[in-house]
Amino acid sequence: MPRIMAKAWGFGLAFIAAAMLALALRPDLRLAARAAWNDPRLLPAVADDARVHYEPEARVCAEAVAEIARRAIAQIESAHGRPFAQPPVIGVYASYENYASANAMGDSDIAAVTRAGAALLSPTLCGAERHRLESVLTHELSHVHLSGWRPLGAPRPPQWFTEGLAVMASNGGGAEGVGDDEAVQAIRDGYRVVLDGRRWIDFAGLGFEIEPPRDPTKNALTQRQRLAYRQAGLFVAWLRRRDDAAFLHLLRALEAGEAFEPSFEVAFGDDAQQLWRRFISDLSQSRRSDARD
């Protein structure tokens, strides 16, 4: 073998070895590699809707998703005040293992995730949780819409806002099983979600000022998360009702890649914590008014 070819071969082997070592030492790189291998864009698309990709065993569900997607996309575009930056991608999985790989978290228990501009749907939404399919898909499309406009590397808005926005825009998606009245009562009783600055998904749930009591008949983690999401959704909806123009101004700033805190203050003339306290005060006044009536 000529010397130059031998060197090239050696460099190639060294590169492969280095890549394998990196994957072995960095679990996040392994997850990212598995996610790329299971990207929904590599799957076939529904004949009548190229936005919906599916594993062959999920074809029937994918066709139902395509029908739902038409309504859900229109709903999100109306709620967000503009069209999607590009056609959204939706992945429908039949294999829990492949879905866990695609979501880059290795977690098959999450009903849906938005990753790399695509909404990924767990097999549970085609089975045991079929009743949640439309609301959860609409919720995820809110995330796809927001991320689709934002420049790569732009600072992320806090989780309470992105999840609250998605709950509001989907009419309760992601917070099923927790009604507005229950969430309002929890706020009045002091079991209030904390509007902290965490930027990334934490499926352990957002924090509470005081931990809400647990219902032994329900999954504690699920109910806690949905209560937090419902409260965040109520606050985001209140912000929009308070000043729709300011709310849309905030969305356009975030879509342009601006940081959340200064954009919020420019839009509303106050910070989120101050308006959260005003929101709670409004709920308290409403309670006193109801009691007088």
Image: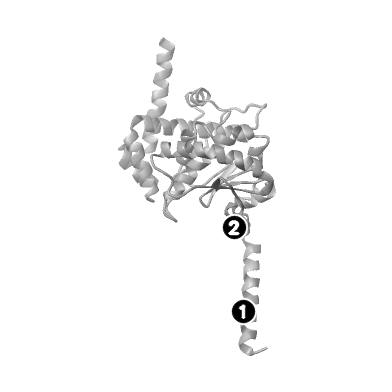
Q: Where, quadrant-wise, is the N terminus in this rendering?
A: bottom right
In the figure, 199 relative to 220: above or below? below
Check disc 2 and report the residue beneath it.
36
Q: Nearer the viewer, residue 292 or 232?
A: 232
**Three-letter amino acid code of the residue under disc 1:** Phe
Q: In this rendering, does residue 274 appear at all? A: yes
How many other residues sit within 10 Å of disc 1, few (<14), some (14-19) or many (≥20)? Answer: few
Check disc 1 and report the residue beneath it.
11
Residue 66, how many percent across, how many down?
Answer: 56, 41
Residue furthest to the top: 293
Residue 34, how many percent across, how many down?
Answer: 63, 57
Mark 1 or 2 closer to N-term? 1
How many other residues sit within 10 Å of disc 2, few (<14), some (14-19) or many (≥20)? Answer: some
Nearer the camera: disc 1 or disc 2: 2
- Residue positioned 65% across, 85% down in the render: 6
Does 194 sit left or right of 45 as displayed?
left
Q: Where, quadrant-wise, is the C terminus in this rendering?
A: top left
- Residue positioned 36% across, 42% down in the render: 250
Q: Which mark is residue 59?
A: none
Give the SS element for disc 2. helix
Q: In this rendering, does residue 270 appear at all? A: no
Residue 233, how many percent across, how many down?
Answer: 47, 33
- Residue positioned 52% across, 38% down in the render: 138
Does 13 sit left or right of 232 as displayed?
right
- Residue positioned 65% across, 90% down in the render: 2
